[in-house]
Image (tube, rainbow, N blue to C red):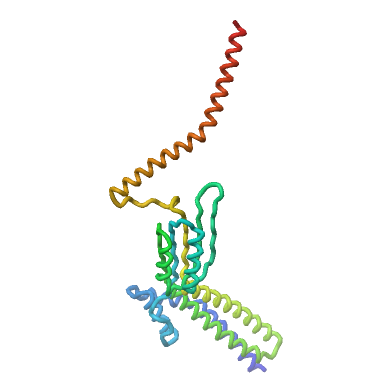
Amino acid sequence: MITSRIALTLGLTTLLTLGGCSAGATESYEDMAVSAPGMAVGESVEMAAVESDGKAGYTSEPDVITTGYLSMSVDEPSAVADQISEVVVASGGRVASRSDYSPVDYGQPSAYLDVRIPSSDLDATVASITDLGEVQEISVNTVDVSLQKVDLDARIEVLEAAIERLTTLLVSAETTADLITIESALAERQAELDSLQSQRDYLSDQTLFATLSINLITPVDATPSDPDGFLDGLMRGWESVLAFFAGTVVWAGILLPWIGLVVVLVAVGWFIARIRSTRKQ
């Protein structure tokens, strides 16, 4: 009886030690990366994996999260948004969100999409999308998350070993107190493992699929580009003259009723003043 209690106590102590090791895994990997400042991030991550597991568990190519923004000028934003959705789905991706704006009285239509594209097909898919309109702005950003992946994998491995050991101790528990203690520790480790696995799955999804935000506007709302030559400049100047006169006509139509109202009020005031002056005479 005493021997079994001692063994159980030693087992729980060992598991607590393993839990502490999982919490300190991040610092150990960060120290490995910092200790070699001239080494690339992907290479330091690979060395960390080799030193921790004794074998190369990760490739030298770093895993990155890719995000981007694309703004295009198109004639019909909603129709082009449908075409973009088809291109994304055909590449193996998906449309995460979409919003369409179709004004009734004034303004210009527009559309906005957030799409997830497989990272391996990102360049080809973006090229297909840009063929559907005139590109106004495009940007792509990448963030290396190899170190985070290594850290999560190491902590998950430690927790899985701790849970396996706790399960073995649970079977051999001889008292109610031991049973409650082991079940509490097992539930805590399992909750932490589920959380880390969720983080790992989310990180994998972010690296496997790039996130691209696409804004579709009409040529009226598009930012004008610089003229290419004399003829282009001449056409821009003529368009500006026409736009000025068109705006002048619109404002004249807006002001005309007010001018008429002011004329009527002035005429009424003059007529009243005229009557008063006649009575005084």
Q: Residue at x 48, y 36 (%)?
A: 251
Asked if 229 appears above or below 166 in the picture, the reply is above
Horizontal relation, residue 265 to residue 26: left or right: right
| Extreme residue toward the right, this view | 176
Residue drawn at x 50%, y 61% is 79
What residue appears at the point 54 percent right and 62 percent down from the top-left corner?
Answer: 98
Q: Residue furthest left?
A: 230
Pick whichever, 83 or 181, lies toward us.
83
Q: Number of callouts in the render?
A: 0
What quarter of the picture does the N terminus occupy? bottom right
Q: Is residue 137 above or below residue 210?
A: above
The percent position of residue 28, horizontal first and vertical second, equals: 44, 77
Left or right: 128, with 11 as reference point: left
In front here: 42 or 209? 209
Q: Quadrant of the C terminus?
A: top right
Note whether 121 is above or below 268 in the view shown. Answer: below
Where residue 197 sits in the image (x, y, percent)? 55, 77
- Nearest to the observer: residue 105 or residue 97: 105
Task: Give coordinates of residue 82: x percent, y percent.
Answer: 51, 64
In terms of depth relative to the viewer, which is nearer, 233 or 198?
A: 233
Determine the image quadrant of residue 41: bottom left
Residue occupying image coordinates x 44% and y 73%: 119
Rendered image quadrant of residue 279:
top right
